[in-house]
Amino acid sequence: MLKEIQLSLTPEQASNKVLLPKFIADKLEISPLRITRIRTLKKSIDSRAFLPKVNATYEVYWDEEAPLLQKIEFDFKIVNDKTPVLIIGAGPAGLFAALKLLESGLKPIIIERGKNARERKLDIAQLNRNKGIDPDSNYCFGEGGAGTFSDGKLYTRSKKKGNTDRILELFHYHGAAEEILYESHPHIGSDKLPLVIENISKTITSHGGEIHFGQKLTEIIIENNEVKGCKTADGSIFKANSLILATGHSAHDIYEMLYNQGVSIEPKGFAMGVRVEHKQSFIDSIQYHCKTRSEYLPAASYNLVEQVNDRGVYSFCMCPGGHIVPAGSNKNEIVVNGMSASLRNSPYANSGIVVEIRPEDIPAEFNEFGPLAGLKFQQSVENLALKNNGGQGQKAPAQRLADFVDGKLSDDLPECSYLPGLISSPIHFWLPDIISSRLREGFKKFNRKMRGFVSYDAVVVGVETRSSSAVRVPRNPETGQHPTIKGLFPAGEGSGYSGGITSSAIDGENAAVFVVKSVIG
């Protein structure tokens, strides 16, 4: 027989391979010996009560042999001589657009400014040692995009935009653990994701697609308002009548290139702030209502949001058991982000805490830049962070969280996971007031929800500015194309339509579907 059952278990019961069949058998009122297979379909942790529970759905077979589990297969076609489609960027939007094109019989040609994941890893190691930054190979640029080495979280709220299960299946097909198919907040981890990304690239190239690393886009070739191809920094020309623009939100030069080429772009809301780090044990104690986290529970996370002076202040990209990393893309800025390895076993927990910024909030001094005003404001904050790090490379300005709220310079700083190092700085003073004042009030409100959040032992690290793009590249919702440039298909975070790995992958797939309709009909 086959049945799906739902259980609420203790973390130990859910993790113990001996106890779990017993509880399932009790639920079915049968002997555990009659069970032939148990498969987890959904799993989440509910820590609202004093004792955390694991809520899970299981598929159970008993009194008959369970059928073999069939791994989902995908119909990737050989496309060596098929119609080419240019894809700018090898992040999730670009890679998943390429996979979709393979299924449709079109040839993806990916143009990526950065390096492949293995070479990129060496540049990131140098960056973490504060040995300099490669502007085209860092946490932002390279095979897999910003997500490859900055966490691999797959949770998304954008379920209306496409099939999230398909995206997870594709990641699993290319080597991600089965747990991502049923965990409520799936996570691959920065130590595992690079290999998965390499496998996706192999699928693309083994079926006739192309990936060109170290090729920085400098011009989209447009004739009579139609795409004809693109040029790269070394003078190479790639010809095609369809181009998916999936560069990621840190490719600031691409926005300026579009603006200078007369391709319409528009400002959009975004967010900026800081990254905050606590001891993971402290977050565990609050979220799990205990002094010491059970070995059967994962590192605890949090999700905080408040309104301060009509703008949202909220946590972003929370990384339990993680590290703060240098996420800038050139030597003239300091930008930080967070990541976690698959085990999430660092003693630290960090999260971006950012303030909502709308186009009307941008200071008047940036008005001369038109639709790039938000981008220039973003860059100015990143430049401020560099000016306040004492000229020490990628060392980041930092302040004890309690001092930030009280408006005081920190005499010293707590230990922190940020490898390039910290330097004490009055972030509350030099961070623009529309951000700083709201953060300070937001932290006070967070402290009422999580008592002790504003702590002398917690540290604020600046600045977190790349939570989303400050610019949108417009597109027609009916055709997926730019409203005035035929054959230009904006997609992903950089074009202003997604946030995070899964939603970007979905948006890339959707862009590929529009390309197929325009080419094949």
Image (cartoon, helix red, strand yellow):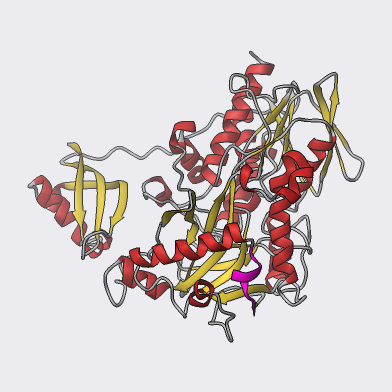
Residues 285 and 101: in front is 285
Q: Is residue 33 left or right of residue 374?
A: left
Residue in view at x 72 percent, y 34 percent: 265
Task: Give residue 151's quadrant in the image.
Answer: bottom right
Residue most extreme to the top: 521
Q: Is residue 148 left or right of residue 487?
A: left
Q: x, y percentage for residue 432?
A: 64, 61
Residues 23 and 270: in front is 270
Q: x, y percentage for residue 436?
A: 57, 63
Look at the picture and state if 518 lies above or below 260.
above
Look at the picture and state if 332 lies above or below 160.
below
Q: Would residue 211 be seen by someone viewing this image from the given angle?
A: no
Residues 88 and 402: in front is 402
Residue in view at x 42 percent, y 49 percent: 180
Residue in view at x 67 percent, y 28 percent: 78
- Quadrant occupied by the N terminus: top left
Which region is colored magenta?
A: 424-431
Q: x, y percentage for residue 171?
A: 51, 45
- Quadrant occupied by the C terminus: top right
Give the total number of marks visible in the rendering: 0
Residue in view at x 19 percent, y 43 percent: 5
Residue most extreme to the bottom: 411
Residues 312 and 172: in front is 312
Residue most extreme to the right: 235
Q: Would residue 345 be seen by someone viewing this image from the given angle?
A: yes
Look at the picture and state if 513 lies above or below 444.
above
Q: Does the magenta-highlighted stretch encompass residue 60?
A: no
Q: Is residue 47 left or right of residue 477?
A: left
